[in-house]
Image (cartoon, rainbow, N blue to C red):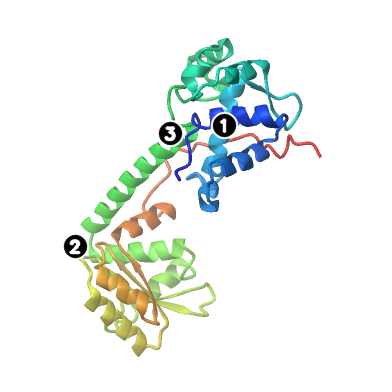
């Protein structure tokens, strides 16, 4: 099932605190994951930053907002409990607790005012509007993905608009950035050296040159079909090579992908979309324009032995 948003988690979290008494955050995350019958993959799906699971992050924001409303409190380090106000709210048997319900409480109203205050923005717990179903990390993730998709699209357009020789340079720069080929000069001499039918170049797999990878790089507009992959596979067999990478600015047909998966020779297919994604990931042809460091509470630090 999809990971619930943080507002959906509020009522189960408050109810859990009511039945369990003092709880650690880790225990709450584990209990709620069981409540929603999340699979291991769902419970451990990471934020784009890779710093925290999405589910753990949303439980954290549900707890934070409940505390801001005075429904949860931390009587001592590393634990939280339900308050009298929280018990009173549960006694009403609400079907759902969300930010509109929390807005009934003076403490949460003060929190909202503080969050919206420009002069006190540095002290605000959350920059996100309390009416949003997204946590701040969700909003950042959405914006990041939109920016990343736009960047990758622009990258691919730029690569396609340049010459085939420039495309070869892009391939070399990317492989070096990914750790192949040794130095930039070594890689540059390797690529384009072979001239063998169906092979555009050879590059070291590691810095010591213990193994090599054969390359085919095509700046195409049309779709690359199975015959091109068969030709490349044949060239690899002629070199007694076991590994090859076929890179194109376009895409591959289903038959080409299936053929590459069936043969014993290992051939990795990189289409235009993946090429642009790898370029962005390894900072090839892009530059950083901003950096935002997101921090969170280290719950382990506040748990007593």
Question: Nearer the observer, disc 3 or disc 2?
Answer: 3
> Nearest the camera: 293 or 207?
293
Where residue 69 appears, as percent x and y from the top left, is 58, 18
Q: Is residue 143 visible?
A: yes
Residue most extreme to the left: 222
> Hey, which quadrant is residue 12 in on the image?
top right
Q: How many marks?
A: 3
Q: Judging from the image, what secondary structure is the residue with disc 3 in?
A: helix
Chain-order first, disc 3 or disc 1: 1
Q: Is residue 294 visible?
A: no
Q: Judging from the image, what secondary structure is the residue with disc 2 in?
A: loop
Could you classify mark 2 by the number of other residues whose Cα lies within 10 Å: few (under 14), some (14-19), or many (20 or more)?
few
Residue drawn at (39%, 62%) of the image? 173
Measured in 3D between alpha carbons, the distance from the residue under mark 3 to the one under mark 2, in whole angstroms, is 35 Å
Vertical order, 171 against 216 (above or below)? above
The residue that label 3 is drawn on is: 139
Residue drawn at (54%, 28%) of the image? 10
Chain-order first, disc 1 or disc 2: 1
Measured in 3D between alpha carbons, the distance from the residue under mark 3 to the one under mark 1, in whole angstroms, is 23 Å
Q: Is 300 on the left-hand or right-hand side of 172?
A: right
The image quadrant where one finds the C terminus is top right
Measured in 3D between alpha carbons, the distance from the residue under mark 1 to the one under mark 2, in whole angstroms, is 53 Å
The residue that label 2 is drawn on is: 221
> Hey, which quadrant is residue 219 in on the image?
bottom left
Could you classify mark 3 by the number of other residues whose Cα lies within 10 Å: few (under 14), some (14-19), or many (20 or more)?
some
Chain-order first, disc 3 or disc 2: 3
The residue that label 1 is drawn on is: 12
Residue most extreme to the top: 106
Where residue 196 appears, as percent x and y from the top left, is 30, 84
Vertical order, 74 against 254 (above or below)? above
Question: Nearer the observer, disc 1 or disc 2?
Answer: 1
> Nearest the camera: 81 or 259?
81
């Amino acid at each position: 099932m999809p990971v619930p948003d943080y507002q959906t988690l509020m009522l189960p979290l408050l109810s859990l605190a009511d039945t369990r008494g003092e709880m650690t955050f880790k225990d709450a995350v584990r209990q709620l994951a069981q409540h929603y019958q999340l699979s291991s993959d769902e419970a451990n799906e990471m934020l784009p930053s890779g710093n925290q699971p999405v589910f753990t992050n949303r439980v954290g924001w549900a707890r934070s907002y409940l505390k801001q409303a005075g429904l949860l409190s931390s009587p001592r380090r590393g634990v939280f409990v339900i308050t009298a106000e929280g018990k009173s709210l549960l006694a009403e048997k609400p079907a759902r607790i969300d930010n509109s319900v929390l807005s009934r409480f003076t403490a949460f109203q003060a929190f909202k005012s503080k969050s919206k205050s420009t002069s006190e923005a540095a002290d605000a717990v959350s920059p996100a509007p309390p009416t949003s179903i997204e946590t701040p990390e969700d909003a950042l993730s959405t914006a990041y993905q939109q920016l990343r998709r736009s960047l990758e699209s622009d990258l691919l357009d730029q690569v396609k608009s340049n010459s085939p020789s420039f495309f070869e340079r892009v391939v070399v720069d990317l492989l070096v950035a990914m750790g192949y080929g040794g130095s930039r000069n070594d890689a540059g001499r390797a690529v384009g050296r072979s001239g063998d039918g169906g092979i555009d170049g050879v590059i070291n797999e590691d810095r010591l040159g213990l193994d090599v990878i054969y390359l085919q790089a095509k700046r195409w507009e049309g779709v690359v079909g199975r015959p091109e992959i068969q030709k490349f596979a044949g060239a690899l067999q002629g070199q007694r090579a076991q590994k090859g990478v076929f890179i194109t600015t376009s895409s591959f047909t289903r038959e080409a992908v299936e053929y590459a998966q069936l043969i014993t020779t290992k051939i990795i297919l990189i289409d235009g979309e993946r090429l642009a994604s790898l370029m962005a990931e390894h900072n090839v042809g892009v530059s950083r324009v901003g950096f935002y460091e997101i921090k969170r509470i280290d719950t382990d630090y506040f748990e007593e032995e």
